[in-house]
Amino acid sequence: MSGKGKLNLWQAVSIAVGTIIGASIFSILGLGARICGSNLPIAFSLSALFSIAVGYSYAKLGSKYVSNAGPIEFLLRAFGDNPFTGTMSIMVWFSYVVSISLFAKAFAGYFLALFHIPLSPMSMAIVEVAVISVFTALNFFGARAVGRAEFWIVLIKLSILLLFVLLGIWTVNPSYLKPVLNSHHIVKTFFAASVLFLSYMGFGLITNASEDIEEPEKNVPRAIYISIAVVAFIYISVSVVALGNLGVEGLIRAEEYALAEAAKPFLGNAGFILISIGALFSISSAINATLYGGANVSYVYAKKGYLPAFMERKMWFDEPRGLYITAVLSLLFAIFLDLGEVSSVISFTFLILYVFVILAHYRLRDNVGGNGGIILFNFLLISGVFFTLMIYQWTSSRRSFYLSLLILLVAFLVEVVYNRTLRKRKLQTRQF
């Protein structure tokens, strides 16, 4: 893209905001309230600060290195092609898989509530199978048509959220918002922030589009920081209105469709319907984009040798097998894990990647810029968030703890045993 076709700063910001505000805000309010109670807005604020810490490294690296490989390009530049870099590449693909499962669970919760169908493991599973199947089909029948509708889906989504905030702020019960700041609840708030961190993920898209942005050296960092600030304002405002109208217990009771339930006190049943429809629009957009992205990542990484070669081979409707493998694995995660487990596994996959991106930034700081002290502080901060998440998983859900480690182990074994020993993948080289 060149000349007039390049994206200006605000166009880049709008793309990032539309990507970040996907399904998460519709799906994890109840989970956040269950973890930290009335400290929910504080947890969202902490997550925003964590995102800025990661965004600092993405901003510096993304303005210098332009590649469709995204963060893997940063790792290749810093550490070269080794088992660690290959493992992280596979983890990136896993992040798409588990994200789709979260979106499918969120879609099922709002869909069943909207049509007054009782929530049960069976009804949730049926909807999850249906929605993933539909969007898998769209990716070989009409992905372009859905892509053209993406702008309007984002506009509808943001309009509904802002309407929710503007109308709901007047009926907030201040007693519901009183924070609890004893040591136990402060720890719980950090637990919640480490999980809610997933709701800010997506700003990295700006680095992948840096070659199409005007003056990327200036506008990539600006777009990252502005998009995080805009999203933080929306998330914190929505959490205040939802918590203030429904209270902690109300959000927990309606965990699968908390935002729609929170609209009832000031908009009645019409508000419930409006938010539910907005959620279904938003989640549909997220499923389509993430499934498409996951399929592309699996295809590109298979060609580069990071994933098994059969994932790049064509199958039904001339689509690579990676699309179907991504969809099936996402469905398995959605059916067999609950919302909290899926959310913490997603946060694990992203956090471990972010820790090493910050390390890559420290190693490359002379080439891309950045204050060494700030980078080291951010590394310690995000490492702390990562270990906080691990402690949360260990104390609240051993299954998600072991599953996170299993995913990491499988990714490592695929890289070392399959890619390097059996397949003898050709190594890639990069210059600083």
Image (tube, rainbow, N blue to C red):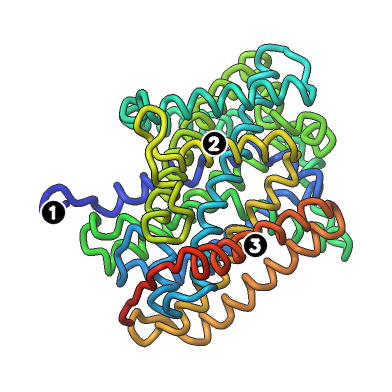
Q: Is residue 294 above or below residue 90?
A: above
* Residue 222 left/right relative to 24: left
User: What residue sits 64% from the left and 55% below the top?
Assistant: 347
Cα–Cα gap, marks 2 and 3:
20 Å
**What amino acid is at disc 2?**
Ala
Q: Could one spot residue 35 in this view of the protein?
A: yes
Cα–Cα gap, marks 3 and 1:
40 Å
Q: Where does the image place residue 268, in percent across and percent down from the top left? A: 68, 16
In the image, 431 versus 30, the foreground residue is 431
The local secondary structure at tag 3 comes to helix
Front position among marks 3 and 1: 3
**What amino acid is at disc 1?**
Ser
**What amino acid is at disc 3?**
Leu
The local secondary structure at tag 1 comes to loop
In the image, 17 versus 357, the foreground residue is 357
Badge 1 or badge 2: first in the primary sequence = 1
Q: Where does the image place residue 365, in percent across and percent down from the top left? A: 40, 83
The numbered disc on residue 2 is: 1
The residue to which callout 3 is attached is 408
Q: Where does the image place residue 388, in percent across and percent down from the top left? A: 75, 66
User: What residue sits 41% from the left and 73% below the top?
Assistant: 76
Tag 1: Cα neighbours inside 10 Å, few (<14), some, or many (≥20)? Answer: few
Quadrant where the C terminus is found in the figure: bottom left
User: What residue sits 87% from the left and 65% below the top?
Assistant: 183
Q: Where does the image place residue 150, in percent across and percent down from the top left? A: 37, 32
